[in-house]
Amino acid sequence: MRMKLTDAALRALKPPAKGRTVITDTEREGLRVRITPKGKVSWLFQKQVKGGRRLGITLGSYPAMTLAQARAAAMEIQIEAERGVDRVEEAKAARAKAEKEVREARTTGDILELYIAGHIDQDLKPGPSREERKRQLRTYLTPHISVPIDALTRANLQKIVDTKQAEGKVVMANRLRAALSAFTGWAYRRGYIDQDVGSGVQKAGKETARRRTPTLAEVREIWDATFRCGDLWGPFFRLCILTGQRSRNEVLKMRWSWVDFDKHRYEIPDPKNGQPHIVHLTALALVELSALRARQKAIGFDTPFVFTTKGHTPASGVTKAKARLVAEIHKKRKAVALRDEMEHWVLHDLRRAQATALAEAGFDEGVVDRIQNHVAGGSRPSTVAAVYTRAQKLPERARALDAWAQMVLGDCNEWTDFGDLT
């Protein structure tokens, strides 16, 4: 509909029953008024930009913007359009510039802390792995923490990975790559960076599964050396050997509330696979725990932790303690004229040594898997099945761990003495 708009005509406008009514003003070319079924009245203006596209702009609403004001605004835009000025595009460019300035004002450190608070702390399972992820990102991004997030490049990230690979730590380099890629992917999806600079970072190389399995003779050497590692770390290493559990999360963090001396067991409430896990305590393990508890009581040390120096947290310094243990082994070898040092091993290898020795002794692999709380490769068990599995084959597991303790001490040479092990 076309007509010369007047104030009287505007006041007389009636909302349509459906759709929208649009009236074009014959007095000012391109000016229109639009009425909706709810009675909302808006001013619109359309004009071809010189040498460009056709503009469609909402000027305001009536009666907040009067007819005279709408015609004046339309005239102003018409003059700009005839000069080739695209007001809409200029507004978009201004917004883009402002957004860019905001992004550039935010540093890598700012976005990293948003990522930690909004993703890592919210979506990742609490525990050492989550804390290690935060530590890795904060440590290895330190050189870039104070620079704008947009200045972070793929080359920066690749250098971090390549440096770690050059140290011979391929697995760690690949873990860093995964952490950095996850961070930049998150930042890109939320618009903090224009490109996901971490997506193209190359892997450090193919990882080789660790296969080091200490022999029973080597385990006995390690066991012997633990008695020269003090009253805290010696028992820690011995319980790692005796129980076959994960050293840092399931032995070092052991609490007295987990230990049941009467039932000869301890229960890990939240191990690596998330399923509570019962561990049989051999007589030898109970001796170690009893001695630790007696020492804490003797000095009036009231703490929930089995292995602790401060009382309110588990002990720290496993790496240094392990280095001391290795040094004691080498010292003993040198004393008995053995020139070769023991091949490099890590605490996790003790689990493999236990599993191998028990399997070779004839114990059922299912029993060994349950001792070490391995997760099956199939689908996750139901809630009922998970509770049942927690206690399943406890007598068999107890017999196996008792046998393992005898093997470590060298008290048993004929494994078939254990009877029908399956």
Image (cartoon, grey):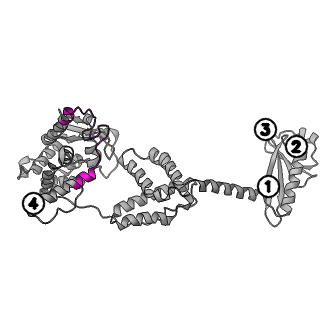
- Left or right: 398 as drawn, with respect to 9: left
- CA–CA distance between discs 1 and 3? 22 Å
- Per the model, the C-alpha gap separating discs 4 and 1 is 92 Å
Is the residue marked by circle 1 packed among few (<14), some (14-19), or many (20+) residues within 10 Å? Answer: few
Per the rendering, the mark at residue 335 is: 4
Picture quadrant where residue 342 is located: bottom left
- Badge 2 marks a residue whose secondary structure is loop
Amino acid type at image mark 1? Gly
Q: Disc 3 designates what residue? A: 38
Q: Which sits earlier in the primary sequence, circle 2 or circle 1?
A: 1
Query: Which span of residues is magenta-colored?
Result: 295-323
Residue depth check, mark 2 versus mark 1: number of the one nearer the observer:
2
Q: Check disc 1 and report the residue beneath it.
A: 56
| Percent of width and height locating residue 382 | 34, 41
Whichever of labels 2 and 4 marks the residue nearer the N terminus, that label is 2
Instruction: Write down the residue under mark 2.
Output: 66
Describe residue 320's horizontal placement relative to residue 140 as left or right. Answer: left
Separation of marks 2 and 3 at Cα, in angstroms: 20 Å
Q: Amino acid at mark 3?
A: Lys
